[in-house]
Amino acid sequence: MAIFCYDAVLKLGALLVSRAICRQCQYPQATCICAQVTIMYCATAIDILQHPSETRVAKNTARICKLCLPQTQIWLGEGADDFRQLRAELATEARPVWLLYPGEAAQSFAQLIEAVQPQVGVRLLLVDATWKKAFKMWQLNPWLECLPQVSLSHLASNYRIRKSPKKHYLSTLEALGYSLTELEPGLDTRPLFQAFNAMQAHFQGYSSDRSNNDRSNNSDRHSLLDSSQD
């Protein structure tokens, strides 16, 4: 698979769908969250390994991460060859590199911080995919197993608009927000969650409006049918 530019793929995906897309936040215009986005800055370097199928998911949260934290790097791919550039960067990285993934060797942030006591910040990797595809990416990228793994499995998700197999399966944004809380206790992560909740509220409101319109249209059709039978 070739290495893709995240922004270019996102814009191409927007052209391929029928609904109008906001050019700034890349969400459907009916659920645009630009007004709820606040730019944040943090000491943690953030890399998101995103499965290509996620660029077509309207409710994907990785794009909110990049909107609120522009330093976030999103790498599209599935197999090891897709992440050659990232791996080259990590080979010369002076900061500790940690992977947020609930593997068998995963530790809590408290355990890793106590053991390593990072002085220059951390470079944090996250996987953005469905859990089935995330596991496949884990299998296709054995180099990830060499990284210290961190888990947040004790937390419950508040991702209401996208189904998850288990309540502790967090969205990418939630995983990042909670990770930053652990890594940088003084950092205000509320802007991330405010944008996240706004996105969910917009989608829920849009779905509710569509349902109401569908019921209204069905009622109108039934009225027309009833009158035609009189």
Image (spheres, grey):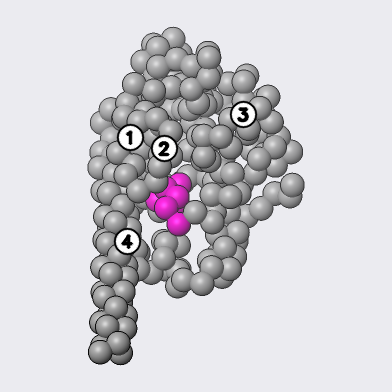
Q: Residue at x 43, y 22 (%)?
A: 151
- Report which residue position mark 3 lands on: 138
Q: Are marks 1 and 2 in contact (CB under 8 Å)?
A: yes
Image quadrant assignment for residue 173: top left
Whole-number angstrom distance, CA of label 3 to CA of label 2 = 19 Å
Q: Nearer the viewer, mark 4 or mark 3?
A: 4
Q: Nearer the viewer, mark 3 or mark 2?
A: 2
Whole-number angstrom distance, CA of label 3 to CA of label 1 = 22 Å
Sequence-first tag of 3 and 1: 3
Q: Say if 22 sits above or below 137 in the image.
A: below
**Which is nearer the eye, 217 or 23?**
217
Q: Are marks 4 and 3 in contact (CB under 8 Å)?
A: no
Q: Residue at x 45, y 47 (%)?
A: 62
Give the amino acid type for the residue marked by disc 3 in the picture.
Trp
Give the amino acid type for the residue marked by disc 2 in the picture.
Ser
- Report which residue position mark 2 lands on: 164
Sequence-first tag of 4 and 3: 3
Secondary element at tag 1: loop
- Report which residue position mark 1 lands on: 157
Q: Which mark is residue 207?
A: 4
Give the amino acid type for the residue marked by disc 1 in the picture.
Ser
Can you give x and y, in whole percent of width and height, for residue 214 in the image?
Answer: 32, 70
Q: Residues within 10 Å of mark 2 (few under 14, many from 20)?
A: some
Q: Residues within 10 Å of mark 3 (few under 14, many from 20)?
A: some
Give the amino acid type for the residue marked by disc 4 in the picture.
Ser
Secondary element at tag 2: loop
